[in-house]
Image (cartoon, rainbow, N blue to C red):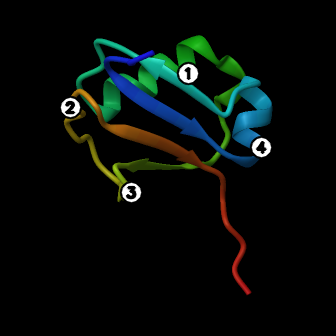
Amino acid sequence: MEHIGIKVLAFGMIAEKIEATEFYLQHIKTTDEFMEYLTEKYPQLQGMKFTLSLNKNIINKNTAISEGSVVALLPPFSGG
């Protein structure tokens, strides 16, 4: 089945909190809009620190999201 919109991948504790590792969204045009959706739909994410990746690029400011994009929610990483 073909999905239209954006694919969202969740990892680690974020996936545990939202009880999903992958889902699809439609009608989301920017990363700010996406974050607003996330905190509304998943209030348990409020206050959690995580990084947003759009098509394998780390996002630090509002960015346009186009159809077919992949957004990843990345938990904090510890290096070593």
Q: Is residue 47 left or right of residue 19?
A: left
Q: Is residue 51 left or right of residue 4?
A: right
Instruction: Read off the residue under disc 4.
Output: 13
Q: Decide: marks 2, 3 in contact (CB < 8 A)?
A: no
State the separation of the CA atoms marked 4 and 2.
27 Å
Question: Mark 4 vs mark 1: which is more N-terminal?
Answer: 4
Q: Secondary structure at mark 1?
A: helix
Task: Residue type at mark 2: give it.
Answer: Ser
State the separation of the CA atoms marked 1 and 2.
21 Å
Residue at 72 percent across and 72 percent down: it is: 78
Q: Decide: marks 4, 3 in contact (CB < 8 A)?
A: no
Question: Mark 1 vs mark 3: which is more N-terminal?
Answer: 1
Residue 56's disc is 3
Q: Nearer the viewer, mark 1 or mark 3?
A: 3
Task: Residue type at mark 4: give it.
Answer: Met
Residue at 43 percent across and 30 percent down: it is: 7
- For the residue carrying disc 3, how many other residues have a C-alpha within 10 Å: few (<14), some (14-19), or many (20+)? few
Question: Mark 4 vs mark 2: which is more N-terminal?
Answer: 4
State the separation of the CA atoms marked 4 and 3.
19 Å
Residue at 55 percent across and 21 percent down: it is: 39
Q: Is residue 8 left or right of residue 2?
A: right
Question: Residue 32 falls in which quadrant of the image?
Answer: top left
Task: Residue type at mark 1: give it.
Answer: Thr
Residue 66's disc is 2
Q: Nearer the viewer, residue 68 or 57?
A: 68
Q: Nearer the viewer, mark 4 or mark 2?
A: 2
